[in-house]
Amino acid sequence: MKKFGWLILLGSQFAIVAGFWSYDHVNHMMGNQLTGDAVGQYLAYGRLAGLLAVLGILFQLMLIGRIKWLEQAFGLDRMAHLHHFTGFAIVVFLAAHPFLVTTGHSMQSGMSRIDQYIDFCRNWDDVLAAVIGVAIMSASIFFSILVMRKWVKYEIWYYSHLTLYVAVALVFGHQFEVGTDLVGNRLFSGYWYALYAFVFANLIHYRILRPIIFYMRHRFAVDKLVSETGDVTSVYIEGRGMEFFPVEAGQFMIVRFWAKGFRWEAHPFSMSIRPDGRKIRLSIKASGDFTRRIPGLKPGTPVFIDGPHGIFTSASCSSSKVLLIAGGIGITPIRALAEEMSAAGRDVILIYANRSRSSIVFEKELDELVEKSKGNLKIVHVLSDDPEWAGEKGRLDKEKISRFVPDIPEREVFLCGPPMMMKLVRASLSELNVPKARIHFEKFAL
Ligand SMILES: Cc1cc2nc3c(=O)[nH]c(=O)nc-3n(C[C@H](O)[C@H](O)[C@H](O)COP(=O)(O)OP(=O)(O)OC[C@H]3O[C@@H](n4cnc5c(N)ncnc54)[C@H](O)[C@@H]3O)c2cc1C
């Protein structure tokens, strides 16, 4: 219901804009522009494209704003996914707006499209700034394609993406200087200002102020590092009043270690223990430039935490029987959930897939959890590439899941692991008739 309500609210912004736009153009002083001559229609639809492009960009900012109230309804990963998708759709409006408006005006003035465009840039207030803004936006979207294909480093893309804020500022002015809809309609321009103010207030609060407020309140700092397996290190973080830090098992946070070589990057990591009101534990696999440096962190390093985030928690589980499935480092949120759910008396089966025994993270801890659970937690390890292993071998597939979990239809499933494994497991679960609504998953990609 919450989700539905927010969808209506967000969707209605598009309806409001379309409403203002059609009112202005139907009641235009030169007559109805929507049914009038070609010039009027080019200009009208060009303006609509511009309005939708800006609305889309504001919507994009909300999607990546890590805005708590939105995230609780949709989940950050889904919002990030939608953000990638919507970014490409906005390109269409960004291209259509100057094309249609230039065409309309060139028909009116008798200039060629190119001359008209140059005239806009030279003589119309704030249009040159807007053109530069659109160029930055287009370049940034192009960069996103490169990063999706892993042709450029994530950080380069991240910092290039920050220029989008400059681009948004550059296109802002021309809307109020030459945007006929906004100039001529005070109600519409009031709404437009309010929309900007609302989006930026949320962004500034959730992306900038909240981590600073949390830091001031808790003074998070690295307490100690513990090596788990060859390439996984647990970072223990302590602070003041940790019992008031509102994290749940299964959630993640975006952390910035305030030390030389770390402070320019913030990365997401999941809690790998059930919150105990005293500490945070993040267990980090060395998988790239940043994570490889983690063992070099020094105790006492201040930590800025953006979060906690995520709806991969027991609050979203209504069943007393649960199947947890983890692959590799995907065990971090799953381990926290196993600890919490078994302690709460749920009947939990955990299937943990790895390549070899040496890559099992928390093997001893997991055994201890089973012992403590009074029969609530069972664990099956499946190894794909370990000739010495006497237990279950091979890939996790439909046959194995139904053998380990004969009562699968009664269970809600929580899944986290490498993308390919998650895809295959979700397909197996679907073949086993587990409804989608009963499968919760966390992707380690935003
Ligand atoms: C919700 C979530 C929870 C996670 N939990 C854990 C965990 O508990 N333990 C763990 O070891 N790993 C976890 N990860 C993965 C971890 O964030 C990445 O492995 C890490 O950011 C890689 O950084 P790198 O520079 O070392 O590697 P790179 O080789 O630079 O990056 C590898 C990939 O990681 C992603 N990535 C890199 N930097 C960022 C960033 N700043 N923000 C988002 N994604 C980024 C990109 O997809 C990139 O292609 C989690 C990821 C997400 C999204």
Image: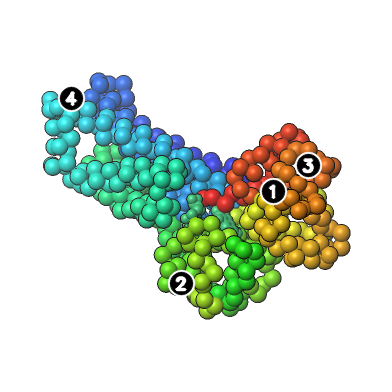
Residue 120 seen: yes
Whole-percent x, y for residue 400 in the image: 78, 42
Residue for badge 4: 107
Looking at the image, is mark 2 or mark 1 earlier in the sequence? 2
Give the mark toward the camera: 4 or 3: 3
Give the mark toward the camera: 1 or 4: 1
Give the Cα distance between marks 4 and 3.
68 Å
Quadrant of res 368: bottom right
Q: Mark 2 and 1 residues: CB-CB less than 8 Å, in contact? A: no
Give the Cα distance between marks 2 and 3.
45 Å
Give the mark toward the camera: 2 or 3: 3
Give the mark toward the camera: 2 or 1: 1
Picture layout, residue 265 above or below residue 156: below
Q: Residue at x 22, y 28 (%)?
A: 103
Q: Amino acid at mark 4?
A: Met
Residue 385, numbered circle: 1
Looking at the image, is mark 4 or mark 2 earlier in the sequence? 4
Model colouring: rainbow
Looking at the image, is mark 2 or mark 3 earlier in the sequence? 2
Give the Cα distance between marks 1 and 3.
16 Å
Which secondary structure, mark 4? helix
Q: Amino acid at mark 3?
A: Lys
Which secondary structure, mark 3? helix
Residue for badge 2: 258
Looking at the image, is mark 1 or mark 3 earlier in the sequence? 1
Label 3 Cα crowd, 10 Å radius (few <14 / some 14-19 / many 20+): some
Q: Residue at x 61, y 42 (%)?
A: 420
Quadrant of res 261: bottom left
Residue 197 seen: no
Q: Nearer the viewer, residue 408 or 244?
A: 408
